[in-house]
Image: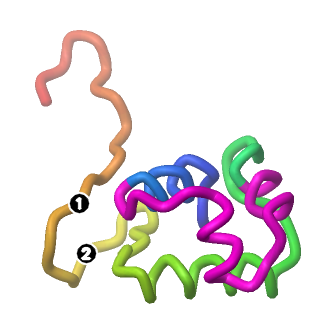
Amino acid sequence: MLTSAQLRAARALLGMDQRTLAERAGVSLPTIQRMEASDGYVRGVVDSLTKVVAALEQAGVELIGDNSVSTGGGRGVRLREPAQPGSRS
């Protein structure tokens, strides 16, 4: 499952704008805009989402799901749950 935050972050890591991602994925610009405006997990047509994920992966982004291990090399970021008040992280 892909979140809208992951989608925006992936584009930012690549320095790619929405229009370029849409072209590379073979979907419309409004489709990318709707995906990125979703709350939480991206909603939409599975075929379109599959194309977007494939375009990001082909451009060099590894999308990592919750509690998944990254097997690839290279630089990147990972979002984690914020630390609870009073706990050490």
Magenta stretch contains residue 4: no
Magenta stretch contains residue 21: yes
Q: Which residue is mark 1?
A: 76
Identify the residue shown where x is 87% and y is 76%: 45
Q: Is residue 82 above or below residue 11?
A: above
- Toward which corner of the image does residue 70 lie, by quadrant? bottom left
Q: Which residue is mark 2?
A: 70
Q: Nearer the viewer, residue 25 or 82?
A: 25
**Element marked by disc 2:** loop
Counting from the top left corner in percent of width and height, residue 49 is at 72, 76
Question: Quick one: quadrant of the N terminus?
Answer: bottom right
- Toward which corner of the image does residue 26 lie, by quadrant? bottom right
Counting from the top left corner in percent of width and height, residue 52 is at 64, 77
**Element marked by disc 1:** loop
Identify the residue shown where x is 51% and y is 55%: 6
Q: Amino acid at mark 2?
A: Ser
Q: Of the residues tagged 1 and 2, which is closer to the observer?
A: 1
Identify the residue shown where x is 22% and y is 83%: 71
Q: Amino acid at mark 1?
A: Gly
Counting from the top left corner in percent of width and height, residue 79 is at 35, 46
Please provide the residue range marked out in magenta. 13-35
